[in-house]
Image: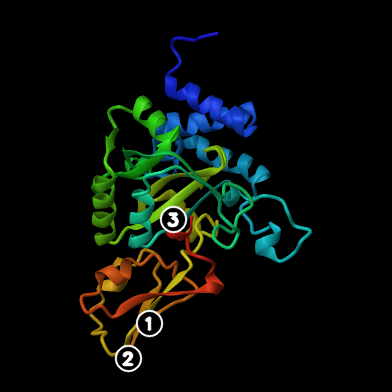
């Protein structure tokens, strides 16, 4: 039976959910998330809209299902602890500029499951792109929820269908289709501002990658949650390191670092390795090229697009 008032992109998303074996509840959850992101995500902002009073009871209810603790086996080291956590359902991985650019420029369908070393979560580890050249630029729901947001606000890249078409069809005043070159320009400009590019994955987004968000710690709900102990972000698989012979202690890198991972001593800058997420923003900001990224297997594996 054809239902004329249901948008085509909604039908495509529903079909994809059925094909994936997802429940009706998951479909509704995903629909609400993508249909009303400025309400769903904006709850974490400081504009204090009328619906924000729902945030505390909502968090309490969700915490009963996905507790805000490190309880699953691969992170606790205890094989008996296998209950999924909040971050398993929704998480991001920082992308250095080179890898973000390659991911954006994918020009053919990709279908792969990322290993746990790349995304240390029990859910949402698929990188499946249908129509990967379909890219939509969306006004950031996190920044929209702030009284004084970072600018510009149109910095969220929705990549591939059915998500890109869904967002474009349901948010025509806040989203627009762009080319891969335009998307790369957005990422370059955001990283130059000191913002971090994250590949985001979500369980009700068919358990897969669906967006590259360019995030700042003052606005981004995921970064705020991570800073408060909810492990919604995993390392890029790299660590920043400093060439002390080149460092002039100008402080630019520390100002740009969203994770507060750079300090200074008498020798120059140093990296707080427990905080560094390997995003690479500091390497772009240093006027003396004193900062580079090195592979850090102890932090995990990079998302290397060339290997997909």
Question: Residue at 68% of width from left, 57% of height from top?
Answer: 71
Give residue 66's position: percent from left, percent from top: 64, 46
View extreme (right): residue = 80
Q: Can you name the residue that lies furthest to the left here?
A: 287
* Distance CA(mark 2)–CA(mark 3): 30 Å
Query: CA separation, marks 3 and 1?
Result: 22 Å
* Residue 255 x %, y %: 28, 69
- Kindly tell me whether residue 219 is visible in this rendering: no
Q: Secondary structure at mark 3?
A: helix
Circle 3: is it few (<14), some (14-19), or many (20+) Cα within 10 Å? many
Quadrant position of residue 102: bottom left
Query: Dividing the picture into quarters, in which one does residue 292 lie?
Result: bottom left
Which mark is drawn over residue 270? 1
The crowding category of the residue bearing disc 1, from other C-alpha atoms within 10 Å (few below 14, some 14 to 19, many at least 20), is some
Separation (CA) of disc 1 from disc 2: 8 Å
4 and 221: which one is in front? Answer: 4
Name the mark on residue 261. Answer: none
- SS type, badge 2: loop
Q: Which residue is mark 2?
A: 267
Q: Earlier in the sequence, mark 3 or mark 1?
A: 3
2 or 3: tag closer to the N-terminus? 3
| Residue labelled with disc 3 | 223
Nearer the observer, 267 or 199: 199
Q: Are marks 1 and 2 in contact (CB under 8 Å)?
A: yes
Question: What secondary structure is marked by label 1?
Answer: strand
């Amino acid at each position: 039976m054809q239902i004329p008032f249901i948008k085509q992109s909604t039908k495509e998303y529903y079909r994809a959910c059925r094909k994936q074996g997802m429940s009706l509840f998951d479909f509704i959850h995903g629909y609400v998330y993508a249909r009303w992101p400025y309400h769903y995500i904006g709850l974490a902002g400081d504009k204090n809209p009328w619906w924000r009073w729902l945030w505390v009871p909502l968090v309490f209810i969700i915490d009963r299902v996905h507790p805000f603790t490190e309880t699953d086996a691969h992170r606790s080291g205890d094989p008996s602890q296998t209950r999924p956590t909040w971050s398993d359902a929704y998480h991001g991985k920082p992308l250095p500029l080179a890898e973000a650019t390659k991911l954006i420029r994918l020009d053919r369908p990709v279908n792969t499951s990322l290993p746990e070393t790349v995304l240390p979560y029990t859910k949402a580890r698929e990188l499946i792109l249908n129509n990967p050249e379909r890219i939509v630029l969306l006004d950031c729901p996190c920044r929209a929820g702030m009284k004084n947001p970072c600018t510009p606000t149109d910095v969220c890249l929705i990549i591939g269908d059915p998500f890109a078409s869904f967002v474009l069809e349901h948010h025509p005043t806040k989203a627009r289709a762009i080319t891969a070159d335009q998307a790369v320009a957005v990422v370059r400009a955001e990283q130059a501002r000191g913002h971090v590019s994250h590949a985001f994955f979500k369980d009700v987004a068919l358990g897969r990658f669906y967006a590259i968000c360019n995030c700042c710690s003052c606005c981004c709900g995921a970064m705020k949650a991570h800073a408060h102990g909810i492990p919604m972000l995993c390392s890029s698989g790299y660590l920043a390191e400093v060439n002390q012979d080149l460092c002039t202690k100008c402080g630019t890198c520390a100002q740009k670092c969203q994770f507060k991972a750079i300090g200074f001593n008498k020798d120059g800058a140093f990296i707080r390795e427990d905080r560094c997420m390997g995003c690479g923003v500091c390497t772009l900001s240093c006027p003396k090229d004193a900062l580079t990224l090195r592979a850090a297997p102890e932090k995990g594996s990079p998302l290397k697009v060339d290997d997909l």
